[in-house]
Image: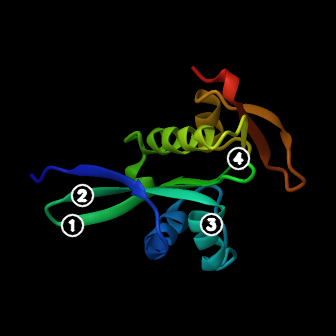
Amino acid sequence: MPTMKTLLRPASAADLPAIWAVRYAVTENTIPRGIIPDEEVRQAIEERGRGWVIEEVDAFGRRLVAFGIVHADDGCVWALFVHPQAHGRGYGRRLMAEMTGWLWEQGLQTLWLTTGAGTRAEAFYRRLGWRCSGSTPKGELRFELQREAQP
């Protein structure tokens, strides 16, 4: 049986097809295809903030299985998605650690994100120490993470 390795690396515009494959594979927080333009994602990765991807690599090749994108201007964790077939491997935690670490390095003191109530994502963020600070007009929960709360 081949040995699988994982690679965490910065995202680029060339990753967009694989990023969309992961995004459309999720079963919670779904969106219609095409509602977010490629250009908006590219700008988020290359101009407004940064993105990272996790690839599984084995003898047969590599497959992008998770990604995260943050905005440096406002501390938003804009996207964090793991392909359902890759759940439970620690990729979400690994990406979140990379993203929050980078945002702290940018000098931000408060990070934020939104997610649906009652989702696996809500439970995940709570386990990582994010605190619910209210809800959005669309009914999503808004979570915040304060720098001073970090070890």
Q: Amino acid at mark 3?
A: Glu
Q: Nearer the viewer, mark 4 or mark 2?
A: 4
Q: Nearer the viewer, mark 3 or mark 4?
A: 3
C-alpha distance separating marks 2 and 1: 6 Å
Q: Relative to residue 6, is residue 23 drawn left or right?
A: right
Q: Relative to residue 1, is residue 4 drawn left or right?
A: right
Q: Nearer the viewer, mark 4 or mark 1?
A: 4
Secondary structure at badge 4 equals loop
| CB-based contact (under 8 Å), mark 4 and mark 2 | no
Q: Quadrant of residue 148?
A: top right
Q: Earlier in the sequence, mark 4 or mark 1?
A: 1
C-alpha distance separating marks 3 and 4: 14 Å
Q: Which mark is residue 61?
A: 1
| CB-based contact (under 8 Å), mark 2 and mark 1 | yes
**Residue 59 on image: x %, y %:** 13, 61
Q: Nearer the viewer, mark 1 or mark 3?
A: 3
Secondary structure at badge 2 equals strand
Q: Amino acid at mark 1?
A: Gly
Q: Earlier in the sequence, mark 1 or mark 3?
A: 3
Q: Quadrant of residue 150?
A: top right
Residue at which label 4 appears = 75
Q: Earlier in the sequence, mark 3 or mark 4?
A: 3
Residue at which label 2 appears = 57
Residue ID at (31%, 52%): 7
Q: Earlier in the sequence, mark 4 or mark 2?
A: 2
Residue at which label 3 appears = 47
**Residue 25 on image: x %, y %:** 50, 64
Closer to the camera, 31 or 98?
Answer: 98
Name above or below for residue 133 compared with residue 71. above
